[in-house]
Image (cartoon, rainbow, N blue to C red):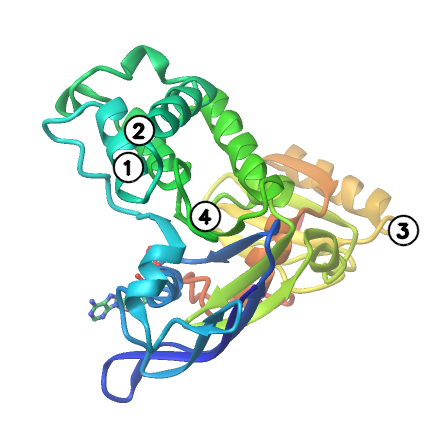
Amino acid sequence: MLWIHQLRKEYKPGEPANDGISLQVRPGQVLGLLGHNGAGKTTLINQVVGLLRPTAGEITLDGHDLVANPAQARRSCALMPQAHAPLDGVTPRQAVETIGRIRGAPRARARERTSELLAELGIEEWADTIGERLSGGVRRLAAFAMAAVRPGHVVMLDEPTNDVDPVRRRLLWGQVRVLAEAGYAVLLVTHNVAEAERSVDRLAIMDRGRIVAKGTPAELRERAVGELRLELLASDAASIAPKIPTAGPTQRTGRRYLMPITGATAPEALAWALRLREAGTIDEFSITPTSLEDVYVGLIASTGENGNGDGANDPRGSGVVAA
Ligand SMILES: Nc1ncnc2c1ncn2[C@@H]1O[C@H](COP(=O)(O)OP(=O)(O)OP(=O)(O)O)[C@@H](O)[C@H]1O
C-alpha cells in the first residue's frame, strides 16, 4: 500500500506548496486528486515519485521508506507527467517499447504489451509515426502507454486526458480501470470532475496545498447542499440575488449563477426563473440534480478561492434584480 503521512513541501522557506497531506492508495484502487491550478497536486506526485524531496512527512510503499530511497520510488512508481512526453525523433512504438525494456520487461513482452496498449488506446495508426508529426492528443495517449507498459506497483497520471478527444478519453479511462484490476495502485490528477466521478474509487480534493475533502464520489456527493441546483445565465452583468429559498450560498462565475435548492422548493424556483426569463433578466436556466462538480466548486468557493471576489457567494447578494 502507498502510505503518505503529513507531507509538506516548501519551495521557499515558510511558504508551503503543500502541507499536512495524508493519503493511502491500496493495490487495485484508483485515487483521484482534484484541485484548481496551483493547489499542489503535481508537487505531491513529484514528491511520491522521488523527483522532489519533501520538506517534512513520510511516504512508504509496502512499509519501504520512499523518502529515504528516491531511487526505489522511481523504480516502484511509473509516472505520466503533465508535460508532453519526449517523443521527438522517435515513434510511439519505439518510445513505449523502450520504456518497457528499461523497466525490466523481456523484449518479446515489451513488444507485445506495446502493441496491445497502442491498439487499446485507439492510436495504432500512429504507432510508427515520428513524434514531431503527432497531434497533442496522440502524444498524450502515447505518454499514458509509456507509464502503463511496465509499471512498478504504483501508476501516477498527471492530467492524462488533456488534449484527448472524447472517444479516446473513454478508452483511456477504461485502461485506467484495467491497471487497477491488474492490482496496481493508481494515483491520478485530473481537472475533469465528471469523468473522475465515473472512473475513480476515491477522491481527494486539494485547495491551496491542503486536502479539504476525501472519500468515495458517493460520500462526497452526500456533502452537497440541496439535492438540486438552479442554474441561471444572466443576460447582462447585473447581479441576481435569489428571490427564492436556497439551500446554500449562490456561486457566480461571470454571467453564470448556481443556486442549490431542494425538491420542495423546485416549483417556486421554476416559477421565479420563468419570470426572470420573461423579464429578459436571464437568457436561459436549468434545474438539474446536484453533481460532484457542484460539490467540488462549492468546497473550493467556500474556502474563498473562486476568484470572482464580488460577494456573489453571499446568498443575499447585492444589486438585487427583481423579476
Ligand atoms: N519549482 C517550483 N518552484 C517554486 N514554486 C513552485 C514550483 N513548482 C510549483 N510551485 C508552486 O507550488 C504551488 C503548487 O504548484 P503545483 O504545480 O503543485 O500545483 P498543481 O495543483 O499541480 O497545479 P496545476 O493544476 O496548475 O498543474 C504553486 O503555488 C506553484 O506556483
Task: Give the Cα separation between the discs numbered 4 and 3.
Answer: 32 Å
Secondary-structure class at tag 2: helix
Q: Using the image as rendered, state which of residue 211 and residue 317 is in the foreground.
A: 211
In the foreground, 47 or 96: 96
Discs 2, 3 touching: Cβ within 8 Å = no
Q: Where is residue 44, by image quadrant?
A: bottom left
Name the mark nearer the viewer: 1 or 4: 1
Name the residue rendered at 22%, 26% in the picture. 94
The residue under label 4 is: 191
User: How far is the residue under mark 1 from the one under mark 4?
Assistant: 32 Å
The reply to whether dot 2 and dot 1 touch (C-beta < 8 Å) is yes
N-terminal of the pair, mark 2 or mark 4, is 2
Amino acid on which the number 1 mark rests in the picture? Arg
Disc ID at residue 264: 3
Quadrant (top left/top right/bottom left/bottom right) for the N terminus: bottom right
Query: Residue 302, percent across and down?
Result: 56, 69
- Cα gap from disc 2 to disc 4, whole angstroms: 36 Å
The percent coordinates of residue 45 (x first, y second) are: 38, 61
Residue underneath mark 1 = 101
Q: Is residue 316 above or below residue 88?
A: below
Q: Which residue is mark 2?
A: 107
The verdict on label 4 being within 8 Å of ligand 1 is: yes
Identity, as a three-letter code, of the amino acid under mark 4: His
Residue type highlighted by circle 2: Arg
Q: Secondary structure beneath disc 3?
A: loop
Q: Nearer the viewer, residue 159 or 276?
A: 159
**Mark 2 crowdedness (10 Å alpha carbons): few <14, some 14-19, many ≥20:** few
